Each structure stands twice: as structure tokens, then as C-alpha cells.
Image (spheres, rainbow, N blue to C red):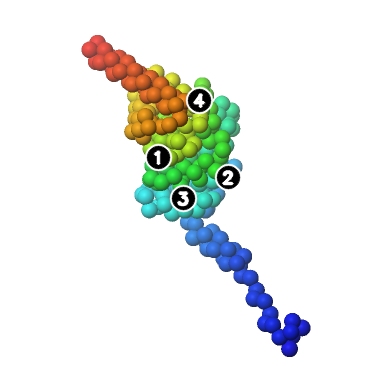
Amino acid sequence: MSERGGQPPPKKRRTNDRQRSKSADLTVNNEYEDVVGKLKGADKESAVKAAKKLKQMLSNATKIGGFVAHRRNLEDLVSVFSRETSLLGTSMYHEDIHRYSISILANCCYTDKTTSTGNQIRRASRSFLDQAVRIFESTTSNIEIRVSTCRLIGNLCNNKELVTSWLSSNTILFDRIALLLESTNENIVTQCLRIFLFLSNHSFTRVSNRALLDFFTFFLIRARLHYLHFYYLLNQEEREC
């Protein structure tokens, strides 16, 4: 008989062990861990090579799905994006790393039609939208960086739930995007119009919040006017040629 009066000893809890085992399995099965680690590293030359390799590895929806399934991958990628955005205009800034990070994030958001990837980005960096604004406001950011950022925002805007629960809270972001419609670069104008087209397709006329409705209506009208102006200038140039 035991000191507990014949009662069997309590079973040992193995929950933590199972959790650790599961976590270890995820780490082992994460084929992107090494390349993402190099992308985050201080060696810029190795980071650029890693960024290029990562983009090549994420060649289809299946690969991208496996990448975003490991939360740490997306967190590290957002971290690289945030770091390079904060370094804009400094000698430490590396444009290629910045461009690759934006492009890969955009591809991930394009492939995932749910809110999962967008929400992971949101959790990884609460100032993510402010960082996008910084890119648009920067006088040193390359036009390709702005185009890629517009594509990334557009892919996020393709999901109505993300727009209403997150993106619509940053009015300055859409204000800056509307200003980009005045650009003479056709690619950036196209990406900006794509953003407002997504917003229009989400039927914001049904939104109960009047302020939010007025906000999007204003920018949709503004986008339409800029498009007509851009189309007019394009026709004028063709006639002059």
C-alpha cells in the first residue's frame, strides 16, 4: 500500500512534452529556415543571394503555403522589410533586399485568399501600414519600390475583411496612394487604380459607418478623375508623336 491509501500515483502530464515535440517537428520540417536566416543576417551580399534564392523557391502556391505555415518565416520576412524601410535615406539601406522582401510578401498575400497571411503580417508589425506610408513619402525610395509596395497593398485590399478590420484604419495610407495617381509612371498608376478598384468591388455603399463610406467614396472619385486625366495626357502624347 502506498502512503496515499492505495490510490494509484497521478499520471505525469505530457502536454508540454508533446508541444515541444510538435515545435521541434515544425523546426525540422521548415525548409526555409536557413535561407531566411541568411536574409536576416548582417552580411548584405549573402542576404541578397538568400533573398533571390527564396523568391525562386517560392515558385508556386504549394511552396508559398508551406512557407507561411511556419509563422516564424513571415515574421522574419516582415522584420527584414521593417528594417530596410527604417533605413531609407541612410548609407545602411540596401535597395535589393528591400525590393525582394516586398515582392515576396506581395506574392504571399496574392496566393492566400484568406485573411491568414494578412493578419500574420499585422501581428508581426503593428506599424506595417505606417511603414508603407513612409515608403510613399520618402524622396529617396526608388520607383520600383513604390510600385512593389502598391502591389503588396493591393493584394491585401483584395480581401474585404482585411480592408474593413485593418487597412481602413489608416486614412493617410490611401491619401498617399491617391497622390501617386499623379505620377507619370504608368506602372505605379496602374497599381494605384487596382487598389481603388478592389475597394470599389467590395461594395462599400453597404457600409453602415457613414464616415468610412464617405472616405472611400472620396478616394474612388479622385482615382477616377486621375485616371481620366492620365488617359487624356496619354492620348495627347500619341497625337503629338
Which labelled disc corresponds to residue 68?
3
Which quarter of the figure is the N terminus placed in? bottom right
Measured Cα–Cα span from mark 4 to mark 1: 19 Å
**Residue 109 at x, y percent in the picture:** 42, 42
The answer to whether residue 51 of the structure is visible from this angle is: no
Measured Cα–Cα span from mark 1 to mark 2: 33 Å
Q: Say if 5 sits above or below 45 in the image.
A: below
Q: Is there CB contact under 8 Å for labels 4 and 1?
A: no
Picture quadrant of residue 127? top right
Give the residue type at disc 3: Val
Specify which label sits upstream in the sequence, 1 or 2: 2
Q: Residues within 10 Å of mark 2 (few under 14, many from 20)?
A: some
Labels in figure, total: 4
Query: 54 or 22, which lies in front?
Result: 22
Q: Say if 5 sits above or below 172 in the image.
A: below
Which labelled disc corresponds to residue 41?
2
Which labelled disc corresponds to residue 172?
4
**Residue 77 at x, y percent in the picture:** 51, 44
Q: Residues within 10 Å of mark 4 (few under 14, many from 20)?
A: few
Q: Residues within 10 Å of mark 1 (few under 14, many from 20)?
A: many
Left or right: residue 25 compared with residue 216 = right
| Residue visible at 54% across and 46% down in the picture | 75
Instruction: Provide the secondary structure element on which disc 3 rests.
Output: helix
Measured Cα–Cα span from mark 3 to mark 4: 28 Å
Give the residue type at disc 4: Ile
Mark closer to the observer (1, 2): 1
Instruction: Provide the secondary structure element on which disc 1 rests.
Output: loop
Give the residue type at disc 1: Asn
Instruction: Provide the secondary structure element on which disc 4 rests.
Output: helix
| Residue visible at 46% across and 47% down in the picture | 116
Specify which label sits upstream in the sequence, 3 or 2: 2
Instruction: Name the residue tied to disc 1.
Output: 159
